[in-house]
Image (cartoon, grey):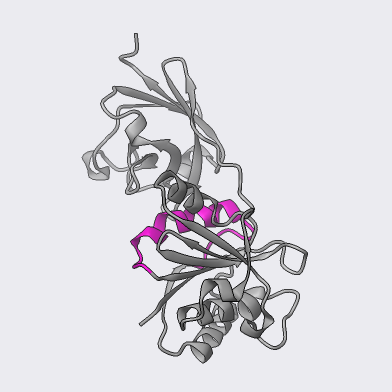
Amino acid sequence: MPVITLTTDFGDKDGFVGAMKGVIWGICPEARIAEISHQVSPQNVLEAAIVLQRAAPYFPPGTVHIAVVDPGVGTQRRALAARIGAQYFIGPDNGLFTPLIADARDAGLETIFVSLEQPRYWLPRVSRTFHGRDIFAPSGAHLAAGVRLEELGRLITDPVLLPLVQPEKITGGYRARISAIDTFGNLATNLAWSRVAGKALLISLKGRLIHGVSSAYGQHPSGELIALVDSEDFIEVAVVNGSAAALLGAQVGDTLEVLFTDAE
């Protein structure tokens, strides 16, 4: 059975997600639908991109990922379908898939992009405010039901890409940024553990210093500010049984310094 995922900023109060599911099952009734998240901050394309980057690789080949965080809905922005590696992605062409595209290219995987331009794969009536229901859900359902990617529209080579900020090498370490904040208030950074593994570290963030990297939250008492390696192998700052975001007043984009204490 085909697998379709949904990632949106719709929340769960209204019926928007339900409407998209209804469209999908009307076209592809055998589809299994998985929710990645509907709690992306409203209109936060970069946050959604990171959520997708962290979740999509764990789905099987052939999965169709439909992502709708679409502040440009109703404008001239393109609607996009893509094959990135062995999976498919559908959503607005606003950079949502940038990290996944970058990862695929780094790994030498094929990427194919299509501008959705075939109304026969949309709902008969397309609103100017809900392309998730009217374009993306039916296109994704047709793709899951066996329609070829290239049949959905016109091949393109220039999808919109977000500028991805990389850690900056500084004297004695790196200047990194907070890339995401999860439900627990843990601060994910854009600094991969592989860049600093084997080094004695001192982390400076919001006037606070953290000595070393822990291997588990439970090694420390409640309320202690720590650093550790998260499940995606990036440096993370956390408070044991608390919220680092609340304690520090931290936001996505804030900088931190990760210094080598054994640097000469």
Is residue 224 shown above or below 112? above
> Which residue is located at x 72 percent, y 86 percent?
125
In depth, the one of 260 and 14 nearer the eye is: 260
Q: From this viewpoint, is residue 68 visible? A: no
Is residue 200 shown above or below 160? above
Picture quadrant of residue 43: bottom right
Picture mark count: 0
The quarter of the picture where the C terminus appears is top left
Q: From this viewpoint, is residue 90 visible? A: yes
Picture quadrant of residue 244: top left
Q: Where does the image place residue 228, in percent across and percent down from the top left?
A: 32, 38
In depth, the one of 157 and 33 nearer the eye is: 157
Residue, far left: 219
Picture quadrant of residue 5: bottom left
> Which residue is located at x 45 percent, y 39 percent?
189
In depth, the one of 172 and 89 nearer the eye is: 89
Magenta region: 37-61
Q: Where does the image place residue 245, in percent across and percent down from the top left?
A: 48, 44
Q: Is residue 55 magenta?
A: yes
Q: Where does the image place residue 62, in percent across and percent down from the top left?
A: 40, 70
Q: Is residue 58 magenta?
A: yes
> Which residue is located at x 61 percent, y 47 percent?
162
Q: Where does the image place residue 45, in percent across and percent down from the top left?
A: 60, 55
> Is 177 on the left-hand or right-hand side of 31?
right
> Which residue is located at x 68 percent, y 73 percent?
117
Is residue 147 shown above or below 99? below
The quarter of the picture where the N terminus appears is bottom left
